[in-house]
Image (cartoon, rainbow, N blue to C red):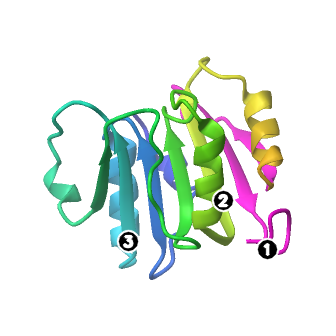
């Protein structure tokens, strides 16, 4: 997986916190951890799996939540994250609306949300509508990884839910 263009979506600043919510650790997870570590930020991982997990050495300092059911929410502190990345997970969960509410609450103002799904497994237009429904603004579909559909939006200060 070529991640150079994908990583150009991110501009981590010192002290930033990124959260990836996914069902597997892969190259995107390791790349995100690396770029946030380079600016002395924090990388958090909410991993939905029922299997035993081999945690790569690169993630030993990562705050990892293991969630064993697609019916349970992940945990995140209010306004604690500068980026939330859902990868291959949002539409597997029994309550995607709950996950988007948690993401909205945990994001700092003007922070971004990214939804990544395997190419062709979701309707990009409906994903953008869903983000708008939860007060994320300027949703854009971005063709950056050949195997993924990617939609990115922003939580704007003083818009929508006011958090």
Find the magenta span and give its range.
Answer: 136-163
Q: Mark 2 to mark 3: distance in Å?
A: 18 Å
First reached walking from the N terminus: tag 1 or tag 2: 2
Q: Can residue 77 be seen in the rendering of this structure?
A: yes
Give the residue drawn at x 75%, y 45%: 131
Give the residue drawn at x 16%, y 35%: 52
Instruction: Say if mark 1 contacts mark 3, CB within 8 Å.
Output: no
In the structure shown, which secondary structural element does the residue marked by tag 2 occupy? helix
- Answer above or below: position of 135 versus 2: below
- Answer above or below: position of 93 versus 47: above
Q: Mark 1 to mark 3: distance in Å?
A: 22 Å
The quarter of the rendered structure image containing the C terminus is bottom right
First reached walking from the N terminus: tag 1 or tag 3: 3
Q: Can residue 144 be seen in the rendering of this structure?
A: no
Residue ID for mark 2: 104
Give the residue drawn at x 84%, y 74%: 158
Badge 1: how crowded within 10 Å, few (<14), some, or many (20+)? few
Residue ID for mark 1: 157
The quarter of the rendered structure image containing the N terminus is top left
Residue 42, disc: 3
In the structure shown, which secondary structural element does the residue marked by tag 1 occupy? loop
């Amino acid at each position: 997986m070529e991640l150079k263009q994908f990583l150009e979506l991110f501009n981590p600043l010192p002290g930033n916190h990124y959260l990836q919510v996914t069902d597997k650790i892969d190259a995107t997870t390791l790349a995100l951890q690396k770029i946030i570590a380079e600016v002395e930020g924090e990388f958090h991982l909410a991993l939905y799996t029922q299997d035993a997990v081999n945690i790569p050495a690169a993630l030993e300092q990562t705050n990892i939540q293991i969630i064993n059911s697609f019916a349970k929410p992940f945990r995140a502190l209010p306004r604690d994250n500068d980026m939330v990345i859902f990868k291959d997970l949002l539409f597997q969960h029994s309550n995607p609306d709950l996950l988007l509410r948690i993401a909205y609450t945990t994001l700092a103002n003007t922070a971004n949300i990214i939804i990544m799904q395997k190419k062709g497994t979701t309707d990009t237009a409906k994903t953008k509508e869903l983000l708008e429904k939860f007060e994320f603004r300027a949703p854009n579909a971005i063709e950056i990884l050949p195997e993924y559909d990617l939609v990115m939006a922003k939580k704007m200060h003083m818009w929508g839910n006011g958090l």
